[in-house]
């Protein structure tokens, strides 16, 4: 169990980006889990009280949209999906605002596209806004601007968006919360003998010894995007933790050494 190594990584980090996946945010019926959001916000507050700065990359706009306007839930047309995200993003932010306000914390919304990270002027403005919010004790809640993006300008998943955010901010740690306990040698939901990969030093070597594919795709992005995100961040000296956000008090337990996951070490380690 690598819980102590993860605990050390959290303890050493002052600037932490946390990504919350849609599966972590959703109940079994597909609606937003308000109790999870309230509890998670308080855990963030405890870490902030210990002197850490946190930026949150939150999926869930479609989940929130479906929770609000179920009559569009089965429509697959891109215009309806983008409209659903427009409705859901408002609901998602309102729920996060309510959750963090219970702990006396303000939040700010940032919506990015791939183009924002490719244009120097936009990138500078993004950094300035991000740094200002964090320096003032406000938690940035970040998502891709799904209501206006299309394939050519989409990042496509919030795993990679969180890595880009961590690099933009020069974060000390990236935590990816999903509905799995980490990276396994095979899909643990269909292969009970699959082993948890506790520490990754080389993503190429990791890919050579695990089974990937449709059966191994968990959540929206899947295992592959999580490995891509970890590789991006690790290349900039940022360690990455992949852990199960569905576990009770997951953030608190990671910080206390009571929970494991997969730890991607920074390339300079």
Image (cartoon, grey):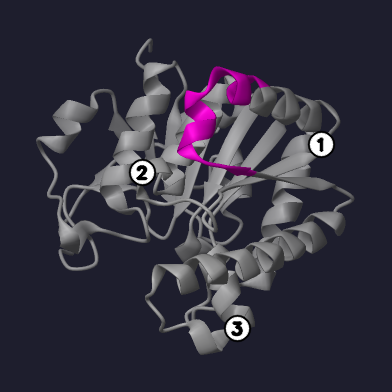
- Residue 82 at x, y = what percent? 51, 65
Crowd band around label 3 with a 10 angstrom C-alpha radius: few (<14), some (14–19), many (20+): few
To which quarter of the image does residue 192 belong?
bottom left
Residue where numbered disc 2 is placed: 152
- Return the mark for residue 69: 3
Residue stretch rendered in magenta on the structure: 111-124
Q: Return the disc, 2 or 3, that comes first in the chain's sequence.
A: 3
Q: Return the disc, 2 or 1, that comes first in the chain's sequence.
A: 1
To which quarter of the image does residue 60 belong?
bottom right
Q: Is residue 130 visible?
A: yes
Q: Secondary structure at mark 1?
A: helix
Closer to the eye: label 2 or 1: 2
Q: Secondary structure at mark 3?
A: loop
Tell which of 247 and 58 is nearer to you.
Answer: 58
Crowd band around label 1 with a 10 angstrom C-alpha radius: few (<14), some (14–19), many (20+): few
Residue where numbered disc 1 is placed: 49
Q: Is residue 8 visible?
A: no
- Residue 257 at x, y = what percent? 54, 40
- Indicate yes or no whether the magenta region holds residue 241: no
Q: Residue at x 58, y 35 (%)?
A: 17
Q: Secondary structure at mark 2?
A: helix
């Amino acid at each position: 169990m690598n819980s102590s190594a993860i605990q050390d990584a959290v303890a050493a980090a002052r600037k932490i980006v946390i990504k919350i996946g849609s599966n972590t945010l959703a109940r079994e019926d597909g609606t937003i889990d308000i109790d999870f959001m309230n509890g998670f916000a308080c855990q963030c507050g405890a870490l902030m009280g210990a002197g850490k700065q946190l930026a949150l990359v939150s999926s869930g706009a479609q989940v929130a949209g479906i929770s609000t306007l179920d009559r569009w839930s089965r429509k697959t047309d891109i215009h309806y999906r983008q409209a659903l995200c427009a409705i859901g993003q408002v609901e998602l932010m309102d729920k996060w605002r309510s959750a963090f306000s219970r702990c006396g914390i303000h939040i700010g919304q940032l919506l990015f596209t791939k183009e924002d990270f490719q244009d120097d002027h936009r990138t500078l403005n993004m950094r300035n806004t991000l740094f200002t919010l964090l320096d003032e004790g406000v938690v940035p809640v970040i998502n891709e601007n799904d209501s206006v993006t299309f394939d050519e300008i989409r990042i496509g998943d919030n795993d990679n968006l969180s890595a880009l955010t961590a690099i933009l901010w020069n974060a000390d740690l990236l935590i990816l919360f999903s509905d799995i306990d980490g990276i396994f040698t095979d899909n643990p939901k269909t292969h009970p003998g699959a082993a948890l990969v506790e520490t990754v030093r080389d993503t190429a070597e990791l890919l050579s010894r695990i089974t990937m594919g449709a059966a191994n795709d968990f959540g929206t992005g899947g295992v592959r995007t999580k490995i891509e995100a970890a590789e991006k961040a690790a290349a900039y000296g940022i360690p990455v933790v992949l852990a199960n956000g569905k576990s009770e008090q997951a953030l608190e337990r990671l910080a206390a050494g009571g929970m494991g996951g997969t730890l991607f070490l920074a390339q300079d380690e």
